[in-house]
Image: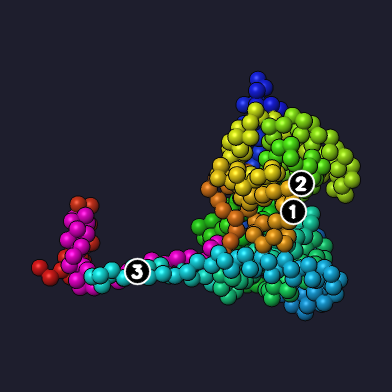
Amino acid sequence: MTLIHTGDANFKTVFSELLGRGKMDMEHVSSIVKTLIDEIRSDDDNALIRHIEKFDRWNPSCGDDLRINPSDMKRAYEALDPTLKSSLHLAYDRIRSYHEKQLPKSWFDTEANGTILGQKVTPVDRAGLYIPGGKAAYPSSLLMNVIPAQVAGVEHIVVTTPTPDNEPNELLLAACHLCGVTEVFKVGGASAIAAMAYGTATIPKVDVITGPGNIFVATAKKMVFGEVNIDMIAGPSEIGVLADDSANPSHIAIDLLSQAEHDEMASSILITPSQKFADACAVEIEIWLKKLPREVIARKSIEERAAIIVTETMEEAVNLMNEIAPEHLEVATDNPFALLPSIKHAGAIFLGHYTPEAIGDYVAGPNHTLPTGGTARFYSPLGVENFMKKSSIISFSRQAINEIGEACALIANTEGLGAHEASVRCRLDN
């Protein structure tokens, strides 16, 4: 893995490459994705079936074959090991409790002249949730997408997930039953995004699409944005760690690898003012790598996409991490809350020696669907508001329009919009 110092002659070049870690070659796949989307729009379920035969290696005979029967979800749930079932319930309860605190409220404000202004917050009618299921299936992602939609009050929730060889993941089915989801379809990739964006005979059109996926899914979401809303364009997983000598190098090493094992394209970046800690962490990474079931994936990620940066001060370390704006950020110092005011850009911030990123993936409560590739500079984690929209409330009394209507009419006149001006003036007393 790359180990650099901020004083190195080539530091700016190497750091610039790290900042570009999230770039995806969407242009390379855009023509493929556009073709898939166009086929769904023109040939409906027939196109879906062809895509499934090609990419997932099974042959649905009709649209109904794409549905997962709720009885299969119930069976999978009832077959769960009791300890695992209890763990899923714990995760569900904590995630729901956290997201209930996010719920925005409608509000109204009345002025002395009778003007009423406010904001009405309502859920979208339909939400489409994409849950990965190719290389691995992630029931935790189902919880993280379904629960905020339910808390928001979305009445119609649609889930799509790829099922290679027509073999649904049993734990994912169990999680669907736990969440009370009934409309689940065995469709993946760009085809699933297109089906939810435009609707087919089997899969209903939705208002917002959320959930992670590969470059084809991300490109499809970007292409259908505007037809529907989306949560974000997510790239490969990543973690940043700020640490000093008070941290345990073995703990930080495995935390870095917790993202590396996701994907060869994942990035893991440690920034520390301690050369001693940097060296110790590099040794521990190699020790841990040899123990991982997904060593091949993690090793490629570490060798090609990871870095340890040694700075002069912790302040310099924080400034560099703000430029990176990581998806996950661990602060492994004795007083992590002292650094919190200086941290400006991160999807999720994990504070202290006993708060590994992995705890946030499953049971902490906050959402693990997070902005990647530096987009934490302007994106937020998935939350309840992704499934809601706001309407402005405006009500003027006769007194109110007489008090400020002239100013409105003057601005309209200045902009050359006569009907706007007249629609106000005709209501004034003079």
* Label 2 to label 3: alpha-carbon separation: 48 Å
User: Label 2's element?
Assistant: helix
Q: Quadrant of the N terminus?
A: top right
Q: Quadrant of residue 345?
A: top right
Is residue 376 toward the left or the right of residue 140 in the image? Answer: left
Q: Earlier in the sequence, mark 1 or mark 3?
A: 3
Which x, y percent locates residue 261? 79, 47
Is residue 267 shown above or below 69?
above
Q: Which residues are magenta?
A: 385-413
Foreground residue among 45 and 330: 330
Dot 1 lies on which element?
helix
Residue under the point 56% across and 73% down? 153
Residue that carries the numbered disc 2 in the rendered image? 255
110 is within the stretch colored magenta: no
Q: Which residue is mark 3?
A: 109
* Residues at marks 1 and 2, CA–CA distance in whole angstroms: 8 Å
Figure check: 381 above or below 291: below
First of labels 1, 2 by sequence position = 2
Q: Position of residue 249 (x, y in %)?
A: 79, 40
Residue placed furthest toward the top: 9
Label 1 – label 3 distance at C-alpha: 43 Å
Residue 25 x, y percent position in the rendering: 65, 41
- For the residues bearing labels 1 and 2, Cβ distance under 8 angstroms: yes
Nearest to the observer: residue 33 or residue 148 = 148
The label number, if any, that marks residue 358 in the structure image: 1
Residue type pointed to by label 2? Asp
Quarter-of-image position of residue 86: bottom right
Question: What amino acid does circle 1 point to?
Answer: Ala
